[in-house]
Amino acid sequence: MTFFKLENQAVEIGIDEIKDSVLTAGYISSGELAEIAPRFGFSPETVEACQRANPVFRTGAEVYNDYTFSELRIVNESGDDDWIGVCLKKNLLLVVDIIDYDGSTKNSFLKAVQRTSSTGLKPEKTFCVFLESLIADGSAAIENMRNTISDMEESVVTGKVEDAFNTQLLEIKKKLLRLYNYYDQILDVATTLEDNDNEIFRDEDLVYLTNLSAKVTRLRSDVDSLSDSADHLQDAYSSFLDMKMNRSMKILTVITTAFFPLTIIVGWYGMNFQSMPEFTWRYGYIYVIVLSVVIVAALVAIARKHKWF
């Protein structure tokens, strides 16, 4: 349980030192929230929501008379997502640690507190800086996936597609979907807070939430654009497979056509009529071989001339 008094600078304090008239930011566990909920007037539903991780991305926020609550699923590059609850009251920002696998969420909170202590002590600004730090790696992740998709497009155009192409593309699409839901979740929370229905923020401080919404909107738009690129790449890959299949079928068709006359020759001389002169001709065997080779060579030459393969 960690609390900071935000006056002239961020100073760590105990829970008994918290005053309603003093700006305060805190980072606590879900178990500690249950202990202090009556003191701050948090509802049982808020406490219950922080006792377990929600398996889906929860959008929006719950607005109460004197505070606003939201549960956030934090996407990490490692694939192990973190979960936090956020309670915002007038002069109080409280972050509830539901799951934090590597301590990155708490570190982001501490950095946000220290950063805002030197530029302006306001809980809503600290909250926005905290969320911005959580999405700070988003631009780099999007750029990496954009480069990967570009490389995969080049491989399709040049015909140098790897066997794991489809699996790799599926993983990219799954990552993009997670990022889109992540940004959509944060945007919904920021929009709800920006409405300020319970008037816990001053009107002049809503600009921080407006700026946060704009940043998240841009990131979500980038992800949406990449999703479209991934869908187009999927279509291009399907076309590539169809062309590859057509090329193979064309070659098989040419081969079948070239050797089909041999079937006729075999059937013709397999009838064993006694009046066939080739049966008694000394060069009949060689004649049939040469005839077969000439016919196949002629058909292959015709196919090559018309660029059938």
Image: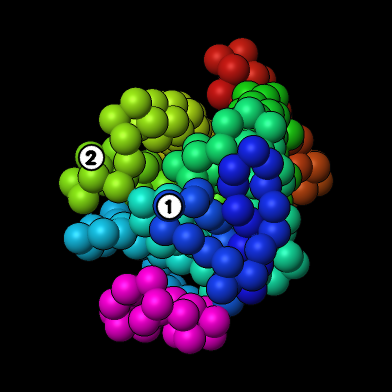
The reply to whether discs 2 and 1 touch (Cβ–Cβ < 8 Å) is no
Badge 2: how crowded within 10 Å, few (<14), some, or many (20+)? few
Vertical relation: 209 (above or below) 78: above
Q: CA distance from mark 2 to mark 1?
A: 23 Å
| Residue 37 vertical placement versus 63 (above, below) | below
Q: Disc 2 designates what residue?
A: 195
| Sequence-earlier tag: 2 or 1 | 1
Q: Amino acid at mark 2?
A: Asp
Q: In the image shown, does 140 or 117 lie closer to the viewer? A: 117
Please state the horizontal and vertical placement of residue 218, each as a whole percent of the image: 45, 27
Q: Amino acid at mark 1?
A: Ser
Judge whether residue 195 is colored magenta: no
Residue tagged 1: 21
Q: Nearer the viewer, residue 67 or 40?
A: 40
Quarter of image, res 144:
top right
Q: Which mark is residue 34?
A: none
Residue drawn at point x = 35 percent, y = 32 percent = 206
Local SS, label 1: loop
Q: Position of residue 131 (x, y in %)?
A: 54, 45
Image quadrant assignment for residue 25: bottom right
Residue at the (70%, 59%) spot, across then down = 12
Q: Is residue 216 visible?
A: yes
